[in-house]
Image: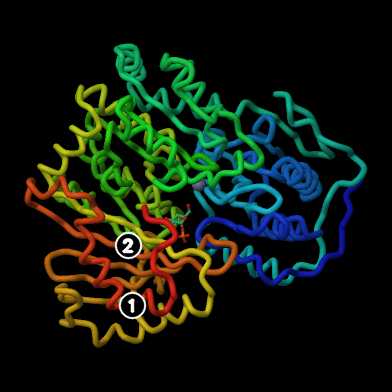
C-alpha cells in the first residue's frame, strides 16, 4: 500500500452550481474527473481532522466512496466517518458534522435529479457548521480545479468494506463505518413530542410516506414505523435503489403523482408526504389538499410554539426570494424579522449561525431550521405531525385556518426545461435590458409597480451577490419572478414564479391555476415566453 501522486490536467467545467457539482454520471466517470474535484476540495480544506462521507445510494455511489476514501487517506485526513453501505442523507450528514465537531463532509448526490448510468451524479462539500460550502469556498475549489496538476491516492489496498459498522485504518487514516440513521433519529426525538405523535398515530390517524426509492427509506422506517409506532406499510418505496426505480426522486405534483392521486382519492390517508433523492426536500399533502412549500413554511412558523424544540419562540425567519411572501405575514404578526435571500440553501447558513433566524425555507420543497444547516425533509413531516397532534386538526383545517387569519398567497412555479441555453439567456437578457422602462406599464390588466434584478447583501459577511433573478412587482401585491436554474446538467431551465395575494376568505377556495390565470398571461406578455421558447406549455408546474 502506498501514496501515489497521479498526474492530471484540469477540467474546465468544475464550477459548483446552486448545490454542489452536478454532472451526467458519464462525465463523473471520465478518468480523473471525480479525482480532480475531490483533490481540489482537499486542497482547499484548512483543517483535515475528520470528515463524514456518504451519499443517496445512486448509481456510482459506492465506486466514488472507494476512490474518495483512498484519496482521503493519501491526503492526510485524520478520520473519515462513512455511512454504512455508503448511505447518508444530506440532513443526516449535516447532523453528524455538527454533533461530532467534524471539519466537514462530502455528500454524493444530485439531489432530485434522476440517477443511473444515463442520469446524474453529484458531489457536495459541507463545511464545519454542517452547511453547504458558501460561495467563497466553492469559488476557491473551482479556481483550484483549474490549476490542478496531480491528485493523491493510495494504491494497492484493495476494496474497503463499508457494509458493516466498525473501525479500521487505511494508511494513517481512521475509517469508521457508522449507522447513518441513529444520530439523526435521536436529534428528531429531541425536537419533537414523540409521545404525542405516537398517540396520534395509534388513534386511527393514517399517513403515507413515499421515500421515492431514495435515501430516506431507512430513516423513515426507523422513525415512523419503529419509534413512532405507525403500521408497517406507512413508508412506501422505502429501499434506496441505484436508479430510484427509474423515477425522478423529486417530491412534487408531477414526479410523486401516485401519492398525489392517492391523497385526492376517496380513501386518502390523513397525511401524505414524500422526500427527494438525498432527503432534504419534502412535500406535504392532506386529504384532498396539497400544501405549497411556501404555505408550509408559513404554517410551521405560525405554529412553532406547539413543538418542544421551538416553544421558546422564533428569532426570525428567512425565505429565498422566489418563495411566496406567506411567511412574511406570519413574521409581521410575531414581530420577528424576515430575511429574503438568493435561491440556494447556502445563503441561510450565516443567518442561522448568527442566530438571526430559527426557521427558513424555499418554494422548491425545502424547509429547515437551526437544528442543522441543511433543509430537512423528514424534519418537516415530523413538524407537521407534531402540529396536527397538538392542534387536533386535519391538514386542510390547519391550512384553511391559516389563510383565514393571514390571507392566502396563491402560488405556482412554471418550469421550462431542456431549453437551448442561448435562447434562455437571451430571454433573461432582454428582460434585464427592459427593466428601466417597465414601471407603470400594464400587461393583461396588471400594472407594474417596480421591477429589478435581485441582489443580496449578506447581513453577516457583507458582500453583494448580484444577478439573482428578475422581479416584477405588480400593483395589488402580485409578483412574477424569472430566473434560470443553477442545478441542471443539460440545456437550460427557465423558472417563472407567480404569486398573488388574496385577503377575502370566500376567494381562498379557488384553484391556484384559476387564481393565477391572468398573471400567467401577464408573464407571457412581459417576457414573450411562448414566442421566444417556441413552447406552448411549461414542462413542470408545481
Ligand atoms: C433548485 C431550487 C433551489 C434549491 C436547489 C437545490 O435550484 O430552485 O431552491 O436550493 O435546487 O435543491 P435551481 O435549479 O433553481 O438553481
Ligand atoms: Zn435534495
- Answer with left or right where residue 187 lies relative to residue 432: right
Residue at 77 percent across and 38 percent down: it is 173
Quarter of the view holding residue 65? top right
Check the image and tell me how it is coloured: rainbow
Is ligand 1 less than 8 Å from the beta carbon at label 2? no
Real-space Cα separation, disc 1 to disc 2, in angstroms: 13 Å
Label 1 residue SS: helix
For mark 2, does the 10 Å Cα neighbourhood hold few (<14), some (14 to 19), or many (20 or more) residues?
many
Image coordinates of residue 12 in percent, x first then y, are 69, 72
Q: Which residue is mark 1?
A: 527
Residue at 59 percent across and 62 percent down: it is 489
- Answer with left or right where residue 523 lies relative to residue 222: left
- Answer with left or right where residue 356 lies relative to residue 448: right
Image coordinates of residue 372 in percent, x first then y, are 44, 40
Is residue 39 visible to the viewer in this orientation of the structure?
Answer: no
Q: Which residue is mark 2?
A: 497
Is residue 523 visible to the viewer in this orientation of the structure?
Answer: yes
Amino acid at each position: 500500500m502506498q501514496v501515489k501522486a497521479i498526474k492530471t490536467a484540469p477540467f474546465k467545467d468544475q464550477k459548483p452550481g446552486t448545490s454542489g457539482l452536478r454532472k451526467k454520471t458519464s462525465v463523473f466517470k471520465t478518468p480523473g474527473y471525480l479525482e480532480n474535484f475531490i483533490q481540489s476540495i482537499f486542497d482547499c480544506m484548512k483543517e483535515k481532522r475528520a470528515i463524514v462521507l456518504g451519499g443517496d445510494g445512486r448509481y456510482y455511489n459506492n465506486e466514488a466512496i472507494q476512490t474518495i476514501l483512498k484519496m482521503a487517506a493519501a491526503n492526510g485526513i485524520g478520520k473519515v466517518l462513512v455511512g454504512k453501505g455508503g448511505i447518508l442523507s444530506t440532513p443526516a450528514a449535516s447532523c453528524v458534522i455538527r454533533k461530532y465537531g467534524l471539519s466537514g463532509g462530502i455528500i454524493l448526490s444530485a439531489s432530485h435529479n434522476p440517477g443511473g448510468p444515463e442520469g446524474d451524479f453529484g458531489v457536495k462539500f459541507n463545511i464545519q457548521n454542517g452547511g453547504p460550502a458558501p460561495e467563497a469556498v466553492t469559488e476557491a475549489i473551482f479556481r483550484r480545479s483549474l490549476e490542478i496538476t496531480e491528485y493523491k491516492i493510495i494504491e494497492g489496498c484493495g476494496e474497503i468494506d463499508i457494509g458493516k459498522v466498525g473501525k479500521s485504518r487505511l494508511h494513517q487514516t481512521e475509517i469508521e463505518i457508522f449507522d447513518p440513521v441513529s444520530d439523526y433519529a435521536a436529534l428528531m426525538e429531541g425536537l419533537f413530542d414523540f409521545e404525542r405523535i405516537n398517540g396520534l398515530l395509534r388513534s386511527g390517524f393514517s399517513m403515507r410516506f413515499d421515500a421515492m426509492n431514495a435515501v430516506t427509506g431507512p430513516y423513515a422506517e426507523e422513525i415512523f414505523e419503529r419509534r413512532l409506532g405507525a403500521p408497517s406499510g406507512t413508508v412506501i418505496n422505502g429501499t434506496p435503489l441505484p436508479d430510484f426505480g427509474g423515477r425522478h426522486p423529486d417530491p412534487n405534483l408531477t414526479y410523486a403523482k401516485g401519492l398525489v392521486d392517492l391523497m385526492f382519492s376517496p380513501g386518502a390517508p390523513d397525511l401524505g408526504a414524500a422526500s427527494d433523492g438525498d432527503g432534504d426536500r419534502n412535500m406535504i399533502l392532506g386529504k384532498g389538499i396539497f400544501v405549497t412549500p411556501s404555505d408550509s413554511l408559513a404554517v410551521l412558523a405560525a405554529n412553532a410554539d406547539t413543538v418542544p424544540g421551538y416553544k421558546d419562540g422564533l428569532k426570525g425567519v428567512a425565505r429565498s426570494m422566489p418563495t411566496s411572501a406567506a411567511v412574511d405575514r406570519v413574521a409581521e404578526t410575531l414581530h420577528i424579522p424576515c430575511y429574503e435571500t438568493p435561491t440556494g440553501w447556502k445563503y441561510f447558513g450565516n443567518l442561522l449561525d448568527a442566530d438571526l433566524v430559527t426557521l427558513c425555507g424555499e418554494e422548491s420543497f425545502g424547509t429547515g431550521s437551526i437544528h442543522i444547516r441543511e433543509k430537512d425533509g423528514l424534519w418537516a413531516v415530523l413538524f407537521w405531525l407534531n402540529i396536527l397532534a397538538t392542534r387536533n386538526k386535519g391538514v386542510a383545517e390547519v391550512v384553511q385556518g391559516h389563510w383565514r387569519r393571514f390571507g392566502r398567497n396563491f402560488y405556482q412555479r412554471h418550469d421550462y426545461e431542456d431549453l437551448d441555453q442561448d435562447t434562455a439567456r437571451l430571454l433573461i437578457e432582454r428582460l434585464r435590458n427592459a427593466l428601466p422602462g417597465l414601471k407603470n406599464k400594464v400587461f393583461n390588466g396588471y400594472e407594474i409597480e417596480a421591477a429589478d434584478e435581485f441582489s443580496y447583501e449578506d447581513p453577516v459577511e457583507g458582500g453583494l451577490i448580484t444577478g439573482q433573478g428578475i422581479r416584477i412587482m405588480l400593483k395589488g401585491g402580485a409578483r412574477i419572478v424569472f430566473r434560470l436554474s443553477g442545478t441542471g446538467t443539460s440545456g437550460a431551465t427557465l423558472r417563472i414564479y407567480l404569486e398573488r395575494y388574496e385577503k377575502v376568505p370566500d376567494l381562498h377556495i379557488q384553484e391556484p391555476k384559476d387564481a393565477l390565470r391572468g398573471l400567467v398571461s401577464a408573464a407571457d406578455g412581459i417576457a414573450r415566453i411562448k414566442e421566444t421558447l417556441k413552447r406552448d406549455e411549461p414542462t413542470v408546474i408545481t
